[in-house]
Amino acid sequence: MEPSPSQETIVAAHYGRLRRLCRLLLGDPQEAEDVVQEVFLKAHEAERLARAPMDWGAWLTRVAVNGCRDRRRAGGWMRFRLRSTHIDDLPLVADTPAPSEAAISEDTRRRIWAAFRDLPRRQQEVFALRYIEEQPTTDVAQALGLSPGSVKRHLYRAVRHLRRALGDAR
Amino acid sequence: MSPCLSDDALERVHADLGSIAERAHLAGCAACTGRSRRMRRDLDLITAVLRETREPLTHVAPVRRRWIPAAVGLSVAALALLVWVEVAVWRAVTPVPATMQPQEVAAILSDVSASLFSVNGDPVRATADDGPLTLEGMARDVDSTLTGDEP
């Protein structure tokens, strides 16, 4: 049997992608950071209780998505925090955009982000896992507790909505 | 050959929801293949934006809160209407206290007179058995008490 990876290895392998996924699903960097910390605490707990999953990646993704859902359900004061920006997240050099940002017009970026935020929660999750995390449809279905057919339908609706938003910008 | 696929059909094929006929058409049609590639590029752009760029700080949140003043106004109006209806209904169903009947006034006056002018100890209380009291009767009672005559 393969030895279980250490906590450091798990964190190093998954921290970045989980943080990005949670930021995408929550829209608030501070909330996302909190959820990621909770996910790794749960991972530590699972390992301590000898309940380590076979596939850490899928397990962490599922726990992170559930954590984001709980946060979104948590109530008004949580949503109020979306209005504010944590000081650590303010760009230090505001007038020099990253090359990837410079290549895409401000209007296009705004439209895409707004269209993504307009998507229903489930479609956001499916799109994020399938295209941002580049997970296969079956893994997405497993992580979200859906059938593969349902994942495809959510994905179809999400892509159609996002492309329409982009189409208006062209 | 079948007609070219609509954008919707192309998106279905792209999501792996297309029919066999649609997929077969796409495989053999240069125009549809070109449109499918364009769709793929759009998707790459969307993915790149969501993956690599910061979310703009101001999104649609303020617009969504426009309903709050309207909701507050409606709530206040509804509350005022409710209070008004309650008061109106309360007034309609609550009986107005009846004014005193002449008999009751006469009985009270009689008691007062009996108390004031009693000459032999405790006053005699007026009772309903004494028959209907009238002002004339009361005057006679007072007269007889003052003069000492039997009524």
Image (cartoon, rainbow, N blue to C red):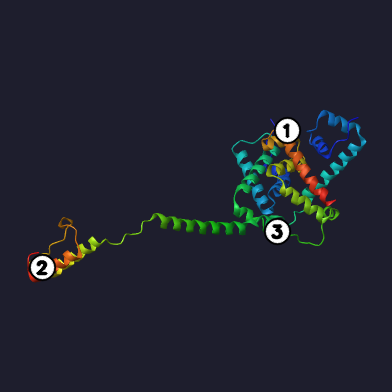
Residue B144 tag number: 2
Q: Residue furthest top?
A: B20
- Name the image quarter holding the C terminus of chain B: bottom left
**Disc 3 element:** helix
Q: Does the residue at mark 3 contact the one at mark 1 (Cβ under 8 Å)?
A: no
B7 vs B65: above or below: above
Q: Amino acid at mark 2?
A: Ser
Say which residue label 1 marks. Answer: A149
The mark lying in front, picked from 3 and 2, is 2
**Residue B104, how many percent across, how many down?**
23, 61
- Name the image quarter holding the N terminus of chain B: top right
Q: Residue furthest bottom?
A: B146
Question: Residue at 70% of width from left, 47% of height from top?
Answer: A25
**Residue A69, how many percent across, how many down?**
64, 45
> Which residue is more in the foreground, B121 or B131?
B131
Residue B29 shows in this picture: yes
Mark 3, other Cα within 10 Å: few <14 / some 14–19 / many ≥20: few
Mark 2, other Cα within 10 Å: few <14 / some 14–19 / many ≥20: few
Q: Amino acid at mark 1?
A: Gly
Say which residue label 3 marks. Answer: A88
Q: Does the residue at mark 3 contact the one at mark 2 (Cβ under 8 Å)?
A: no
B22 vs A7: above or below: above
The mark lying in front, picked from 1 and 2, is 2
